[in-house]
Structure formats: C-alpha cells, structure tokens
Amino acid sequence: MRPGPVTTRVAAIDCGTNSIRLLIADIEGGALRDVERRMEIVRLGAGVDRTGRLDDAALQRTFAALDDYAEAIRRHGAQQIRMVATSATRDAANRADFVRGVMERIGVEPDVVTGAEEAALSFAGATRELAATGEVAAPFLVCDIGGGSTEFVLGDGSGVRAARSIDIGCVRMTERHLTDDPPTDEQIAAAGQDITAAVSEAAAEVDFAAAASLVGLAGSVTTVTAIALGLPSYDAARIHHARVSASDVTKVAMNLLAMSSAQRAALPVMHPGRADVIGAGALVLDTVMQVGGFSEVVASEHDILDGIAFSIVEA
C-alpha cells in the first residue's frame, strides 16, 4: 500500500507595522487547513517614519503578543515556525533589539524580508485558491495595504510577473498627514497627493492594465469590504472573495475620513486598534482603484500569512 500524503503542522507569524498575526495550520498535499488564526494590533511601527527607531512601548506590546503566540504554538505542537517581519523593522535603526526579543520567545530569528519578497509571499497566499478554482479572472493584481507599505504584485497561476513595494500605508499616512481627528480637507488632499504619486510610480513599473482582476488584502481592505456589505459584525466567511465596486469603495473611504476615531470605533465591524488609521487605509484602496481604472476589488482573507505557511514546506 502506498503511504498517504504527509501532514505538516506549521506556525506562520506576520509582524507588520500595525499588527502581528499568527496562523497555525496543517499542510497536506499542497492544501492548507487552519488550526488557529489570531491577530493583535501592536502598532510596532508607531513613530518609525519620524524617528527611524522602534518605540520601546511598541516593542513591549509586540513581545507580549509573541509570548501568547509562543504558548499557542507549543500547545498545538507546530513542527516548524517561520516569522516574517516587514516594513517597520526594515526601516528601524534598533532592529537588533527586536530580533533578540523574538529569538528569546519563539526560538527562531525573524526574516526581515524585502518589499519584493513580501510581495511574492502575499501573492502566493492570496491567489493559490483563486488560481485553482478559476472563480476570479487572471491575471491578478494583488494589492496588500499594510501599515507602513503597500505591495503590488501582478501574476497568474504560473507565478509572479512583476512586483513593487511603496512606502505608503495606513499608519504612515495617518502619522504623516491625517493628524487631526477627523482630518481636515487640506490634510486629506495632501495624503491623496502623496498616495497618488506613489501608486502612479508603481503602476509605471507593474502593468496595472494587464490585470483582469484586482485582489485586495489585509485589514484596511477587509474592513472597507465589511462596511460596504453592511455586515452587522465582522464575518470573515462573508468577506472572503466578496466583490466591492469602485463607487462603494469611494463612498466608504469618504465617510470614514469624515468621522472621528470614536465614531469609527463604534462601527460594528471595526477592530478597536484600527479605528484611527482606517481612513488612510481606505484612501489608499480608493486611490489604487482610481489610478488603475478598476471597477471592483475582490477582497481576500488569505494573504501573506498563508504564503508564509506554504513557504515553510516548500523551501
């Protein structure tokens, strides 16, 4: 009798500018099955755009979340771990303090990936299922809106054709421009100009026009989708692969930017740690759709975390 496919239990951690997330999953025969997914808003990148350093309080918030994640990894018996750290740690002068704290807690060194590597992992996580089912037309332009950066990846079932990372994200734009609560029209206009210039630069390098579908990833996109759908609470199953029109994205973005943080926090789908930066994230998504001329965005709950998990067994 031929032995069945081997199941490997892995732990993937994505540490970004705004949040740190954990996926523990079983991978068998190229398929991934969730065991546990978790997210904590730790705002690791708070102030990095201004100071060039990771704030001590932000490091402690991140390490506290990692302590909890380490316990979950042990409890579920994950055989292999990979942690990817992205924009905030790429920019930080005191990156060594972060690396040392991670090693002490989970026993592996974080991979501080380049923008291109981050883009490839996001693309793999977001599109493997889409490419297999054919429910969304390829080629895909994957847009991963983070706290400190946004990644664009063009490709299809055969892989990545082009990728570009830009230093535009919901935390960075909020700290740089949207400093009032709610932001002023002048602040919104300045942020819009900054975002448009960077997105246009990316579009010159990654051929947006070659994409048949725009696939949006991460919390800004999924939260905008939840609001556009009118969900009474955050529902990942309803959000995953939902389609939102360009006009609805614009409407949601403008409404969010007109609200105070307290008003946004009161929305039933809003994660409390995202309320102060979601306006900037929505503005990034709206600008991407306008620059690229996309009529809709397909939201995905599968993203870089899934790509990290697959990379563990495919290395």
Image (cartoon, grey):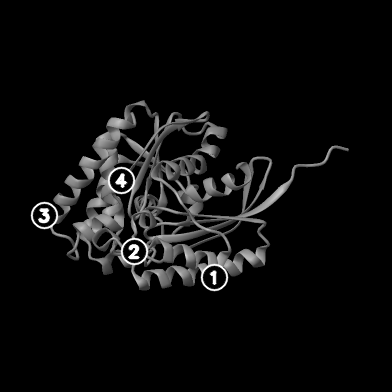
Separation (CA) of disc 3 from disc 2? 25 Å
The mark found on residue 186 in the picture is: 3
Q: Is residue 217 left or right of residue 176?
A: right
Residue that numbered label 1 is attached to:
68
**Of circles 1 and 2, which is in front?**
1
* Residue 35 quadrant: bottom right
Crowding near pointer 1: few (<14 within 10 Å), some, many (20+)? few
Q: Are marks 1 and 2 in contact (CB under 8 Å)?
A: no
**Where residue 267 is drawn, which disc sits there?**
2
Q: CA distance from mark 1 to mark 4?
A: 32 Å
Helix, strand or loop at mark 4 = helix
Which quadrant of the rendered structure holds the N terminus?
Answer: top right
Q: Amino acid at mark 1?
A: Asp
Residue 161: quarter of image: top left
Q: Earlier in the sequence, mark 3 or mark 2?
A: 3
| Alpha carbons under labels 1 and 2: distance apart | 28 Å
User: How many angstroms separate mark 4 from mark 2 (CA)?
Assistant: 19 Å
When the figure is inspected, residue 66 is found, relative to residue 224, above or below; the finding is below
Circle 3: residue type = Glu
Q: Position of residue 109 (x, y in %)?
A: 53, 58
Rendered location of residue 32, percent (x, y): 62, 47
Dots 4, 2 in contact, CB < 8 A: no
Question: In this image, 36 relative to 279: left or right?
Answer: right
Helix, strand or loop under label 3: helix
Residue 93, numbered label? none
Q: Which mark is residue 285?
A: 4
Horizontal and vertical percent position of residue 197: 20, 41
Which is more N-terminal, label 3 or label 4?
3
Q: Closer to the N terminus: mark 1 or mark 3?
A: 1
